[in-house]
Amino acid sequence: MSDTNKTATLTIDGQSHELPIFSPTLGPDVIDIRKLYAQAGVFTYDPGFTSTASCDSTITFIDGGKGELLHRGYPIDQLAGKSHYLEVCFLLLYGNLPTAKELEDFETRITRHTMVHEQMHNFFRGFRRDAHPMATMVGVVGAMSAFYADSADVNDPWQREVACIRLIAKLPTIAAMAYKYSIGQPFVYPRNDLDYAANFLHMCFSVPAEEYNVDPILARAMDRIFTLHADHEQNASTSTVRLASSSGANPFACIAAGIACLWGPAHGGANQACLEMLREIGTVDRIPEFIARAKDKDDPFRLMGFGHRVYKNTDPRAKVLKQSADEVLELLGVDDNPLLQVAKELEHTALNDPYFIDKKLFPNVDFYSGIILEAMGFPTSMFTPIFALSRTVGWISQWKEMIGDPQNKIGRPRQLYLGETERNYEDIENR
């Protein structure tokens, strides 16, 4: 962030106030309003903080108009096409792509921390057998500070580093355990001979009674889902992690807060909502009916998985994931799966219908990730936990950056109060 030597003039009741303007390396200039209240006695009003920069960051940049997503300056399509998830984790955490030696060391450290404390198995069994995996994850990740107190001191740089490694390493294990618990199967321990994505699939789908081999196409698709969801700038869950960490809370509590926020259907539940919509459509012959409903402005029905709040022309993540979706569907076949048949036909219709083209209702990353996860055999209840384990590296990178920021202050948003003015208490007999 650099001072542009430009200022914005705000006039209130005839008095002018000069506010500094700063320029980022990418994106629009920002007006610094930190001293506005002290100078003018007013706050700004911005519900949802959609026009407010709450921090400065060097991690991720999004240009919704261009359909651009950069991690440390690298375009997401290059990372998803040429790199893999753990290399992207290193990039987000440390700022640069690793050397071969650095990557080997990093992957070894992650691999050696994938097991969870054995007593955590008992913690899982405290949940109802039909507990949603996200409910389980919120509780278990929050409880990690009780099992790993030796890496909970945010003021110790080494403990922060250990916490980063532990969270990235153990979230797939915890997510897989939450899934196994929800379907009544035994937990499967991680294997050090498998890569990150293959290990997760093995923990989810293998059983002690027989051998399970992970197909490399499925592992690659899983790795791409992880990569494409690794970070997405100052979204709701990331902002939640930052707000929680601004109080000095331990990293496990902060990530648990992020998971809780991600659980919302307007955030991490979008791909689940997409699959539920496909189930509502049911069969290919009903697609025209639902397309007509989507075009009817008086009908509340909306096509889930199409368009994006941030990306106005195209979702750069979707272009990459479409390739994986095609590979997975070809591998597993869709002829006997009506849901996936609906998805393929709906995608074809939307990409060729002038209405959807004009409205920029393109298939987004949630559409393709939902299709892939459904084809792999995951229930919709696992879609958001998989999103959470993918996003953990983004959350922990943002947390790490915030802890090291000398401008870090405890979050304290203001409000526009519209309640009662001061009034006197009346005794109950006089009310």
Image: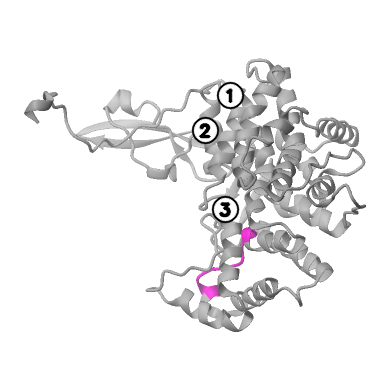
Vertical placement of residue 338 versus 12, above or below: below
Query: Mark 1 and mark 2 in contact (Cβ < 8 Å)?
Result: yes
Amino acid on which disc 1 is placed: Asp
User: Quick one: label 1 or label 3, which is nearer the N terminus?
Assistant: 3
**Range shown magenta:** 356-366
Label 3 residue SS? loop
Front residue of 321 and 113? 113
Q: Position of residue 135 (x, y in %)?
A: 59, 42
Q: How many marks?
A: 3
Vertical placement of residue 293 versus 375, above or below: below
Label 1 residue SS? loop
Front residue of 367 and 15? 367
Residue 55: numbered disc: 2
Q: Which residue is mark 3?
A: 269
Label 2 residue SS? loop
Mark toward the viewer: 2 or 3: 3
Instruction: Give the class, few, some or many, for how many residues have Cα within 10 Å of label 1's Cα (few <14, many ≥20).
Output: few
Residue 244: numbered disc: none
Q: Picture quarter containing residue 161?
A: top right
Amino acid on which disc 2 is placed: Cys
Vertical placement of residue 369 versus 139, above or below: below
Q: With 423 as the anchor, is 8 left or right in this view?
A: right
Q: Position of residue 300 (x, y in %)?
A: 41, 69
CA distance for labels 1 and 3: 31 Å
- Residue at point 77% right, 53% down? 222
- Residue at point 48% right, 80% down? 292
Q: Which residue is mark 1?
A: 405
Vertical placement of residue 86 versus 277, above or below: above
Answer yes or no: is residue 94 visible.
no
In magenta stretch: residue 282: no
Q: With 35 as the anchor, is 197 left or right in this view?
A: right
